[in-house]
Image: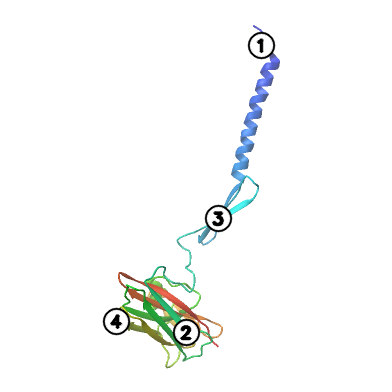
Amino acid sequence: MKINRRLVISSALGIVAVIVLLVVLLSRDDSSTSTNATVNGSSTTTAKADGSGTTTTSFQSSANTIPPKPYTTPSMPLTATVSGNSGVRSGDVVKVRAEPNAGSQMYGIDARLCRGDVGISTEGAFRPTFGGNCIIDPLAPGTDAVVNLENPTPDKGLDVEFRVGTGTTTFKTQSGKDVTITCGPSNPCQIVLKLQYPNGFGFQAFPVTFR
């Protein structure tokens, strides 16, 4: 039986063409997606070309993402406002008013003066010798490092008067790390509140600028 050589050659060329086409398609699909992770692992960027030829980009935060500053704990059952926190001189009083929402309560407030370039969202970050973010001692005579207030009437509001100082303080954390915190015209700081309410507590911070 004779075999048509032209038919064999044509079939072989067809198979090769299909294989080449599959390789090209797979290569294009792989090249259309790229992933770029930041050095500190704080975010991942993924870009992929869609059918129209445009590029869409999505961002995904990691567990190491630094919270925004000043930070506020979401969905707290209270409202806090501040006054006198702009253009402050050493010894000036920053006033904070906190009130529980209708049907809730507020048991107390702890207020600290902290560096302004961090978002404080946890108890460890709030405690000076743990996080190294808030001052231990007043920056100037007659000023405050921390104010602690209990609320004698939890269903009502509470006022905090914080005497803000300017200057520099240096101390060690419990891990032995040296920490230096400066508050002044070139170094904005923040007053961070730890707000205590039923079944938990949260944080709210207000920036403080100096002149």
Outermost residue on the front side: it is: 102
Outermost residue on the top side: it is: 1
Verify CB contact (< 8 Å) between mark 3 and mark 4.
no
For label 3, the SS is strand
Which residue shows up at 64% across the image and 37% down it? Answer: 24
Q: Residues within 10 Å of mark 4 (few under 14, many from 20)?
A: few
Circle 4 residue: 153
Residue 83's label in the rendered image is 2
Circle 1 residue: 3
Circle 3 residue: 58
Instruction: Name which residue type carries label 1.
Output: Ile
Tell me where residue 94 sits by quadrant: bottom left
Instruction: Specify which label sits upstream in the sequence, 3 or 2.
Output: 3
Q: Is residue 145 above or below residue 7?
A: below
Mark 4 → mark 2, Cα distance in angstroms:
23 Å
- Percent position (x, y) of residue 98? 39, 79
Instruction: Name which residue type carries label 2.
Output: Ser
Which residue shows up at 46% across the image and 84% down it? Answer: 169
For label 4, the SS is loop
